[in-house]
Amino acid sequence: MDKQELGAFLRSRRERLRPEDVGLPSGSRRRTPGLRREEVAVLAHISTEYYARLEQGRAPRPSSEVLAGIARTLRLTDAESDHLHILAGTAPSRTRLHRRDVRPSILALLERLPQTAAFVTSAAFEVLAWNDLTAALMEDFGKLAPEERNLARRAFLGPETLYGVSDATEFRHSVVMELRATLARYPSDPMVTGLVGELRDGSPEFARLWERHDVQAAPMLTKTFHHPVVGEVTVDCDALTLTDRDQHLVIYSAPPGSPGAEALALLSVLGAEAGEFLG
């Protein structure tokens, strides 16, 4: 149970709600934003003292029933509710380290996807495997040291261009949310804790977003790359969860006959050297 993170998460969610959001009268002006602790406690059917101790990181582990009441009161999404249970230590725990080995069948699939850029990322945004079109569209990750293949590090500490993508700001926000959930699942993984610490120390933007305690991102359905060789490449973006290893298979494709499909076809001919201009 991570008491400090649990308390900070509860406080951040309480401060985002208005009394009218939960059926209470708005009343007079408040000195601080959001609901009062006693209001959350009443609605969740727990004592105000116990809820206050939860936010202060001084309470014993809450039961699943108590957490369910708090999640309902704070209007948490399913993802936020799962995160709450993980922080409280009531969710099934995973192995201590996140997995970085890719299933052989997925490796084979990467090479069989026609006119499609595809790659696999770990729970900590490491690019673990990729196909040739990914190297042409983004970068030849095979020429990089393993620590340089991390998209979270690239997004916050690397070049401003971020492969020329149009949604760099949204992607950075998504990275923070996903890393917070990853840290909750693997609190003892030195690679995960080290990465989060590095990003918090090295990027004011990451540090600012981290303090928001967001844990659910809007899906990014399309993405446009501004490629220096073939110009704009607009693709559909699909991220498939590989649940057995807590990884993602990311697929960039384009409808047949579209400008994006034509650009991908040209990149497949040019090969990995085309991606070197984005490094």
Image: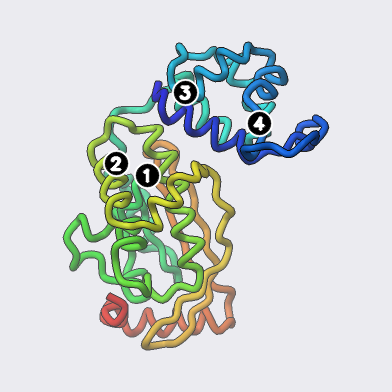
Q: Which mark is residue 56?
A: 3
- Lower position in the chain sequence, tag 3 or tag 1: 3
Q: Nearer the viewer, mark 4 or mark 3?
A: 3
Q: Which mark is residue 276?
A: none
Give the x, y percent position of residue 107.
33, 54
Looking at the picture, tell me which residue is in the foreground, 132 or 19.
19
Q: Amino acid at mark 2?
A: Val
Q: Total number of numbered labels?
A: 4
Q: Secondary structure at mark 4?
A: loop
**Which residue position is annotated with label 1?**
123
Q: Nearer the viewer, mark 1 or mark 2?
A: 2
Q: Amino acid at mark 1?
A: Ala
Q: Residue at x 25, y 65 (%)?
A: 141
**Which residue position is annotated with label 4?**
74
Q: Residue at x 31, y 37 (%)?
A: 98
Q: Nearer the viewer, mark 2 or mark 4?
A: 4
- Compute the Cα span from label 4 to label 3: 17 Å
Q: Which mark is residue 192?
A: 2
Q: Residue at x 33, y 65 (%)?
A: 131
- Lower position in the chain sequence, tag 3 or tag 2: 3
